[in-house]
Image: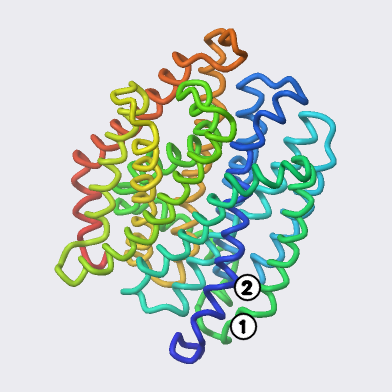
């Protein structure tokens, strides 16, 4: 049987890290190119939210089938095949002349990169000791953060030598390379490594049911989902327009601020994993760290929504840092289920996250459109305040559930849960 000791970690980590780097770059690039899309196609805020969030919709729709594929065929074959769809989507996006075409391309991209994080988590659950999963998962998330970092000032610089269409052509080429890298570099799974390799469809579906009927799952899932969809929907699109319309920054200055936010996110992914790994030796569970971080993140969002301070950059850097806390429950949840269900645990949670991110990103645009545009042509600050406050309100409700759902809390605390 293949073991973590017999395989150099970089053969597993680097290929999947590259895939997630590209996934996150695709996710956030519209925050920088949004002015070009708006000016070229005359988009309203709701149009911009819809076409950008199409990524989240197909991403979410494929999560449950993805969990079955990951548990049955393994992360290597699954991700390398799906990335080819992302490459096709990038080409379609680049060549499109209509909003419908952009939505189609963006949707294909979302489908194609839908496995980039979950395949990595599945691979690490196979080849990495479970007590080190929070640390390795943190570095995986940091690779995504580097993708977010690349989607700021570097993309703005690239737009000075090409247009947004050229950016997506290059992204498509890089995605084809990543697909080949994963297929050739990642070790093949040993036969018989997981019972799910030979289980039938009925057993696979039964595993999904086992995950979604678990009180432990439903104790932590609402808070995780609320925190993550807030982070994804705002950071991947609306942070850029907010910095220009509410923060009063120029396009170049907004791109620089987005770069610092992304850098804070990278630091958050790494440090959250390191902190969880260190405090584990002191008897403090990763889920406790996650809940604390998500509560601080809510406070930061309140300060942004209601402009409690004019310190724009430090506030948004805190947004990037503490927004990463919601990733820690993924590793904690997989340890509450048998190993052969790890793919379905993560993809089940991810499905809910991305459905909510799709709704939130689109709804944010719809709420902003309730106010007339400013004389300068931007979106009204009152619209951002109402939209961000609504997202924060959902997180408050999720926190109340976390406190009150005793059955789930007890099940999560049970070592056999």
Percent across and percent down for residue 91 are 81, 48
Q: Secondary structure at mark 2?
A: helix
Nearer the N terminus, badge 2 or badge 1? 2
**C-alpha separation, residue under disc 2 versus residue under disc 1:** 7 Å
Instruction: Please report the residue visible at 75 percent of the width from the left and 63 percent of the height from the top.
Output: 176
Tell me how many marks there are: 2
Q: Quadrant of residue 319?
A: top left
- x and y percent of residue 282 in the render? 14, 69
Q: Nearer the viewer, residue 142 or 205?
A: 142
Q: Is residue 407 left or right of residue 325?
A: left
Q: Nearer the viewer, residue 188 or 43?
A: 43
Q: Which label sits on residue 76?
A: 2
Residue shown at the point (34%, 55%) measured from the top left: 329
Q: Is residue 43 rendered to the left or right of residue 334? A: right
Q: Residue at x 52, y 79 (%)?
A: 10
- Residue shown at 65% from the left, 32% from the top: 34
Please tell me whether mark 1 sits on a helix, a strand or a loop. loop
Dot 2 crowding, Cα within 10 Å, few <14, some 14–19, many 20+: many
Q: Is residue 151 left or right of residue 417?
A: right
User: Looking at the rendering, in which quadrant would you find the C terminus?
Assistant: bottom left
- Dot 1: few (<14), some (14–19), or many (≥20) neighbours within 10 Å? few
Residue 226 picture location, percent across and down? 38, 38
Residue 88, image x, y percentages: 79, 52
Q: Which mark is residue 188?
A: 1
Q: Is residue 389 above or below residue 72?
A: above
Look at the numbered discs 2 and 1 and tell me whether their residues touch, using CB distance below 8 Å: yes
Depth order, front residue of 312/3: 312
Q: In the rendered view, would you say 369 is above or below 191?
A: above
- Residue 170: quarter of image: bottom right
């Amino acid at each position: 049987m293949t073991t973590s000791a017999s395989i150099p970690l970089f053969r597993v980590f680097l290929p999947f890290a590259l895939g997630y780097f590209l996934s996150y770059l695709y996710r956030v690039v519209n925050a920088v190119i949004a002015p070009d899309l708006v000016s070229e196609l005359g988009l309203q805020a709701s149009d911009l939210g819809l076409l950008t969030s199409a990524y989240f919709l197909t991403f979410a729709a494929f999560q449950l089938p993805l969990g079955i594929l990951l548990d049955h065929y393994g992360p290597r074959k699954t991700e390398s095949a799906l990335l080819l769809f992302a490459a096709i989507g990038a080409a379609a996006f680049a060549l499109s002349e209509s909003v419908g075409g952009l939505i189609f391309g963006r949707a294909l991209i979302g489908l194609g990169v839908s496995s980039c994080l979950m395949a990595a988590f599945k691979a690490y659950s196979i080849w990495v000791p479970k007590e080190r999963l929070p640390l390795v998962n943190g570095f995986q998330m940091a690779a995504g953060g580097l993708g977010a970092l690349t989607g700021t000032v570097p993309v703005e610089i690239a737009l000075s030598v090409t247009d947004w269409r050229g950016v997506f052509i290059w992204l498509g080429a890089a995605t084809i390379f990543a697909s080949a890298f994963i297929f050739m570099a990642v070790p093949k799974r040993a036969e018989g490594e997981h019972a799910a390799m030979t289980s039938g469809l009925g057993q696979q579906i039964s595993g999904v049911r086992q995950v979604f009927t678990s009180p432990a799952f439903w104790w932590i899932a609402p808070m995780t989902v609320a925190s993550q969809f807030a982070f994804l929907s705002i950071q991947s699109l609306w942070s850029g327009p907010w910095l220009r319309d509410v923060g009063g920054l120029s396009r170049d200055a907004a791109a620089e601020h987005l770069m610092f936010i992304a850098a804070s996110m990278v630091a958050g992914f790494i440090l959250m994993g390191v902190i969880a790994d260190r405090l584990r030796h002191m008897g403090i569970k990763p889920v406790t760290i996650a809940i604390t971080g998500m509560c601080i993140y809510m406070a930061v969002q309140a300060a942004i929504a209601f402009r409690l301070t004019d310190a724009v950059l430090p506030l948004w850097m805190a947004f990037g840092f503490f927004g990463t806390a919601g990733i820690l429950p993924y590793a904690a949840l997989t340890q509450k289920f048998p190993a052969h269900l790890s793919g379905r645990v993560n993809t089940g949670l991810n499905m809910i996250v991305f459905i909510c991110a799709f709704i939130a990103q689109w709804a944010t645009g719809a709420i902003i459109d309730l106010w007339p545009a400013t004389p300068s042509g931007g979106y009204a600050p009152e619209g951002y305040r109402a939209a961000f406050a609504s997202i924060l309100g959902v997180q408050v409700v999720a926190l109340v559930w976390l406190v009150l759902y005793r059955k789930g809390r007890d099940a999560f605390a049970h070592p056999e849960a």
